[in-house]
Amino acid sequence: MRILIAEDDSSARRILAAILKSWGYDPVVTTDGAAAWAALQRPDAPRLVLLDWNMPRLDGLEVCRLLREQPTSDPPYVILLTGRGAKDDIVKGLEAGANDYLAKPYDSEELQARIKVGRRMVELQAGLMKARDALAYQAMHDSLTEVFSRRAILDRLAGELARAKRDNGSLSVGMCDIDHFKEINDRYGHQTGDEVLVAFTRRVQAGLREYDCLGRYGGEEFLIVAAGVKETNGEENLYERLRAAVAGSAIRAKAAELSLTVSIGVVLGAERGTVDETLAAADAALYRAKAEGRNRVCYVKSGQ
Ligand SMILES: [Mg+2]
């Protein structure tokens, strides 16, 4: 584990670095507060910090304050080292944001024990961050297909609508429904149905542009949010390309090779409407695509 040392006294610095190494840590050495502060700004900054109080440029207390002013959910663990031992100073140090405090000359066993506490805190925090990130990912993504979840794609839709309105941009929204999907489930089982859903999303995603979003709206219904799509232009059109990509070749599941088609209802000029209006219009266009024989794209302009 890397530990940042900020100490202006060269012999104290050398001793500290040597002792940390002997305990199996990897010291990152800085010689004043400003250098320590700069090192702590780096994305790969050490998570544990031994900070001398009295240093030129920025003192340890100021570095603590700067650190605590930063909006972060993953702050480093700071142990303040100082010759000051008065109660007022200890309070001042902790109030500035130090996690712990050790008066010089420090006892090396005590330092080691306090570093161990810091290390435990840092590791605990890293574990919590990881769990939090995993939960956030799970909430945002469909567990089967890993495209955006319903909640996430609706959030995207709301965000992109607001942005298109503000920037005078254009936005289209496509509601996709795999044709006769229930028959696949009934005939081959849900395992195959799941394989088809995954293969379908991969195929659609491959046809999307980097800034288009795909989310699972429900069972076999998917929503596409595409900025900058203004009007239909035949074979060049995004949605027509996606429809053709799905119908173009069979999907190979373990149980069978399956020909798949998709019906898509597209709202053009979605930026003129609300989320609810857009979804209702896309639904209506999808319904029309189904009624007209499936495996097709039907368009509707928002507000019409
Ligand atoms: Mg000093």
Image (spheres, rainbow, N blue to C red):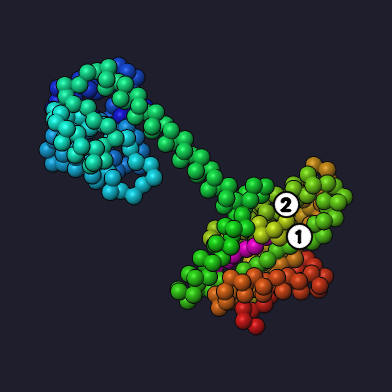
Give the main secondary structure of the magenta stretch.
Answer: strand
Which comes sooner in the sequence, label 2 or label 1?
1
Boundaries of the magenta span: 222-227
Q: CA distance from mark 2 to mark 1?
A: 9 Å
- 129 vs 304, nearest the viewer: 129
Which residue sits furthest bottom? 304
Q: Quadrant of the C terminus?
A: bottom right
Q: Are marks 2 and 1 in contact (CB under 8 Å)?
A: yes
Q: Which mark is residue 197?
A: 2
- Tell me the quarter of the picture where residue 114 sits: top left
Q: Looking at the picture, does residue 110 appear above or below residue 207?
A: above
Residue lying at 58% horizontally and 62% vertically, measured from the top left: 154
Residue lying at 39% horizontally and 28% vertically, measured from the top left: 120
Residue lying at 85% horizontally and 47% vertically, measured from the top left: 188
Q: Looking at the picture, does residue 197 appear above or below residue 178?
A: above
Judged from the image, the secondary structure of the residue bearing numbered disc 1 is strand
- 270 vs 275, nearest the viewer: 275
Say whether residue 267 is left or right of residue 24. right
- Determine if the C-beta at disc 2 is less than 8 A from ligand 1: no
Q: Amino acid at mark 1?
A: Ile
Pinpoint residue 64: horizontal percent, then vertical percent: 24, 41
Q: Is residue 129 visible?
A: yes
Q: Quadrant of the N terminus?
A: top left
Q: Which mark is residue 129?
A: none
Say whether residue 109 is left or right of residue 199. left
Say whether residue 113 is left or right of residue 298. left
Figure label count: 2
| Residue 187 counted in the magenta span | no
**Crowd tier of the residue under label 2, counting other residues whose Cα lies within 10 Å: few below 14, some 14–19, many 20 or above:** many
Which residue matches tag 1?
178
- 74 vs 170, nearest the viewer: 74
Pinpoint residue 256: horizontal percent, then vertical percent: 84, 46
